Image: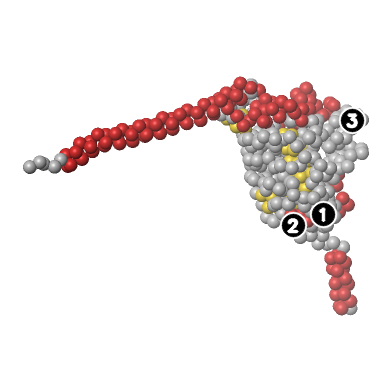
Amino acid sequence: MKLSSWCVLALLCLTCFCHGGLSCPASCKCYTKRAEVVCNEVPLTEYPSEGLLKNTTLLTIQFTNITSISEQHLNATPLLQGLHLYSNHLKSLSSHLLRGVPHLNTIDLTGNRLTDLPADVFTDADWLHDDSNLTWLDLSGNQLTKIPIGLTQLRHLSLDDNQLSHIPTGLLDPLNSLDEEGLDLTVNPFLCDGKIEYLWRWLQKNKKKVFLPETITCAGPESLTGRSVMSLTESELKIESQLKAAVILVTLQCIRVKLLNICLSLLLQRFCKLQTDPVHSIDTNVIPVA
Amino acid sequence: MGDVAKGKKVFVQKCSQCHTVEEGGRHKVGPNLWGLFGRKTGQSPGYSYTQANVDKGIVWDEETLNIYLENPKKYIPGTKMIFSGIRKKKERKDIIAYLKDATS
């Protein structure tokens, strides 16, 4: 009697095991019908690889303490369509992060601690071409100083509330799939020196594609703080670059004058030496005649 | 009582990129919101919600919308909606007033 009870118990445990009793990461909730996994407000410090089913299509990890995510992590869920990583402590993304998830259409990285992204994080994957599914990327609320390149197929790109101060010339040109108001650059400390001209021109040309373009403002220089980038006049832009050029010119002039001074004093020194030395040499050459 | 006109302004600015409100309006990135009040989560016909959203199971009214709109991902973990929320209580009140007016 006792042995059969143990057998039944063992069988039950085995059944439980085989039916995926461990097929949901610890502390997370799994909606098996749609292959969705939600890890919300739990004390995770590492990406929850253990128990993540291969057919997962939507993964939400939010309000946790995870600090990094890698290509290896994502390779475990090759059918992933949505990656929602809202409000964690992500400091970095690894290179080739997206290589193993060709069905990805949405990435939400809002509210993490991202500073720099590897240059190839959004370019180095076979499937990341013009017809790929990746159309929505949210990077708002981080500390990015540079815009990542690639992702020409994006319809929506949120970069608001970061630390962008410059947009390098040409960087926004490849974004030709943007929806109306699809690009958000608000709440960034843009420096409105001569280098802002590219952004200024791009905004004039593409304002329909930008969310609240008139609220993209200058954080400096002091004379332009608070001004909307779009409101800057050509002459203000020119003045800024002219001012810079003038400063450089004046500095060069000062250096020239200083060098000239040094040369003159050197020459003067030599001249004076010449004046005194010949007299001294004549005296010594005089031979008294008996 | 929220201000419907002000609410419309906020809606247009922050929500209309993904949602329509009128009867028969199309689904965009997000569902059409006609008939929202008094309805359970995840019920706009023809829109593909996440299971997490459908399972939330609450009924939309002024109170639940107020909590939701402050931080959607906190209220419905696992939602597809990518929107960090409307921090200002007054703005939420206005937008809720507008939604009540425009979706019924």
Residue B55 appears at what percent x and percent y? 85, 46
Q: Residue A119 or A76: which is nearer the viewer? A: A119
Q: Which mark is residue A108?
A: none
Residue at the spot 68% in from the left edge and 40% down from the top edge: A147
Q: Residue A134 or B92: which is nearer the viewer? A: A134
Residue at the spot 74% in from the left edge and 54% down from the top edge: A71
Residue B67 appears at what percent x and percent y? 75, 37
Residue A175's image quarter?
top right
Q: Which residue is mark 3?
A: B25
Q: Chain of mark 3?
A: B
Q: Considering only vertical position in the picture, is A287 above or below A78?
A: above
Q: Chain of mark 2?
A: A
Residue A250 appears at what percent x and percent y? 47, 28
Crowding at dot 1, Cα within 10 Å, few <14 / some 14-19 / many 20+, comes out as some
Q: Which mark is residue A72?
A: 2
Crowding at dot 3, Cα within 10 Å, few <14 / some 14-19 / many 20+, comes out as few
Residue A106's image quarter?
top right
Q: Amino acid at mark 2?
A: Gln
